Amino acid sequence: MDMTDMNSAAAATPSGRRQGEVILDLQNISLRFGGVKALTDISFNVREHEIRSIIGPNGAGKSSMLNVINGVYHPQEGRILYRGHERQRLEPYMAARQGIARTFQNIALFKGMSVLDNIMTGRNLKMKSNLFQQALFWGAAQKEEIAHREKVEEVIDFLEIQNVRKTPVGQLPYGLQKRVELGRALAAEPSLLLLDEPMAGMNVEEKQDMCRFILDVNDQFGTTIVLIEHDMGVVMDISDRVVVLDYGKKIGDGAPDEVRNNEDVISAYLGTSH
Amino acid sequence: MLYRENGQFKTSYAADQQIFPIFQERWAMALLLLVAFVVLPLVGSEYWFRAILIPFLILSLAALGLNILVGYCGQISLGTGAFMAVGAYAAYNFMVRIDGMPLIVAMLLGGLSATVIGVLFGIPSLRIKGLYLAVATLAAQFFTDWAFLRIGWFTNNSSSGSVSMARLDVFGVPIESPVTKYLFVLTVVCVFALMAKNLVRSAIGRQWMAIRDMDVAAAVIGIRPMYAKLSAFAVSSFIVGVAGVLWAFIHLGAWEPAAFSIDRSFQLLFMVIIGGLGSIAGAFLGAGFIVLLPLALDQIPHLLGIPLSTATITHLVHMIFGALIVFFLIVEPHGLAKLWSVGKQKLRLWPFPH
């Protein structure tokens, strides 16, 4: 897909994209660390197949919100419904098992491992052979290793990182590391993908590439995406709906155009005259 | 010139996933095994087997086990000596208390006993990390030192506190002479090294390394930290336990708890660090460095015909050995295995600069 396609795809949103049922429903979420209120009474939902952005100034609680969704933090109050089921206290690996994958704001790759191995770890939930079969590396274990390698190669092709397949990730430039991290999340074939500032610190070309990958993931695999991003151009272009946080509170929610014209949002970003 | 992968194209993922993907490496490995299994038993002297090769192989195995825990899973342990002791004393009790217990079964049971204790002392790793964990595993060391010294049952109420194991055999073949002992140890080490390599290149190995490199990210992609850490403790202490059985039964013959003191734990940790964290070959290189180098240094004055007293030589060996450790760690903090792989990379292009 070249740039014109990307523009047309972006222009087609939000109306062009199919949207399904509510897949994730967050109700009255409050999260505190001691006396610090990270999130206060936040409610919003995510529909299947949509691109849902979370924006807000620094320290607004965006990353905390993602950490709540995938079980790294446990909110003191509120209910989380995922696919209609209320979720009890849940650990991150259980969220992964339910099909929630994510990338991190600060790259959280496995530095000592190659690109290939990093992405292979994304398949680990789907690997069923036991320790003894793996020790012998024979029969089922080897077949499985090859089958998952094929899947991983598809991800590598998709992200166009074939040439660095066997490079230790620590040696890659920043933009590629971000891409590998997306690959690791994609390898798990998630139904809900949480992206924490996937374009931070990138130049324009890298941002365009990343946008293209995000839109392609959404388009080809139907993956629901929750996106945190500071680049308003990107957010307004590719999101279906945007939720705005400020100081741990929700100050706006809706289609990009609604949010853009919301008084509270404008004052949070630009300040108000008193 | 000789070490090139030119023209060696992989056409299947199976071929790409081989342990030695390069043709020359496969031949070098085959040659090494041929020398170890055939040539050395024909030409080696009794001193070589007893004092050099057997201890080198057994400590390599223990270092290999420890490397899985420290190098691959990133959990520092100072309880290696303890897990070796558990293996040795457990196997001893199985041999003494059950008539007709085969050596290999006792060895594996010893390993399993070490696994149980290893997992037990690994539980703190779920809450604490790094140096704090190292101190927690130290508890294992002190506990086993105490238990095997004070609880008579473990030593079959031996009055001296020392126990011994003689007249070993495997499938009716006596393991008495140095050569048979050497071949037995070599076989066990090769089998375990192969299985360890298979583990670290499979899903479980990637889980261990993921926990080591970034535990939050590992949990977020579905790796259970508890399972990954405790399985690393289990596999590691199993291998270490088996090494303990070999050390006691084959190398020492008669032993007391001091054979598995904290010094042993430190020695093994040094082997892993000098050899290379997170490398199977590193365990062998590290053991080679720590076991073989002092012996080699010891011989140099004799070979050069320099008249020095034995005491002076011992002092010199200590000083040179210490200096070499520092030198190697400065040249390559990631250990000899890293140095080895850098060397191989250079060799691929040699004699051209790039």
Image: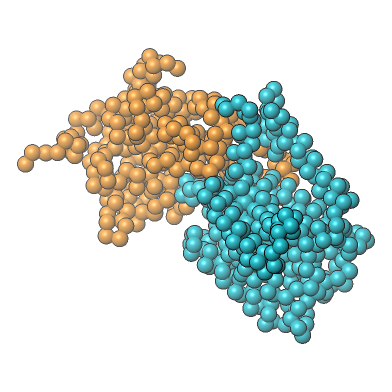
Chain colours: A orange, B cyan
Query: Residue visible at 65% across and 66% down?
Result: B312
Q: Position of residue A81 (x, y in %)?
A: 41, 46
Taking the image as shown, residue B42 lies to the left or right of residue B51, namely right
Can residue A20 be seen by looking at this rendering? no
Query: Residue visible at 77% across and 85% down?
Result: B159
Query: Residue visible at 69% across and 22% down?
Result: B7
Tell me: residue A26, above or below residue B321: above
The quadrant of the picture occupied by the C terminus of chain B is top right
Taking the image as shown, residue B84 lies to the left or right of residue A259, namely right
Based on the displayed image, in which of its 4 quarters is residue B310 positioned?
bottom right
User: Outermost residue, right direction?
Assistant: B172
Tell me: residue A155, above or below residue B36: above
Q: Where is residue A71 in the image (x, y as percent from the top left)?
A: 43, 50
**Is residue B353 or residue B118 the one in the foreground?**
B353
Can residue B305 be seen by looking at this rendering? yes
**Is residue B111 or residue B23 the one in the foreground?**
B23
Tell me: residue B301, above or below residue B93: above
**Is residue A219 or residue B288 the one in the foreground?**
B288
Taking the image as shown, residue A248 lies to the left or right of residue B190, namely left
Based on the displayed image, in which of its 4 quarters is residue B109 positioned?
bottom right
The quadrant of the picture occupied by the N terminus of chain B is top right
Q: What is the count of numbered marks?
A: 0
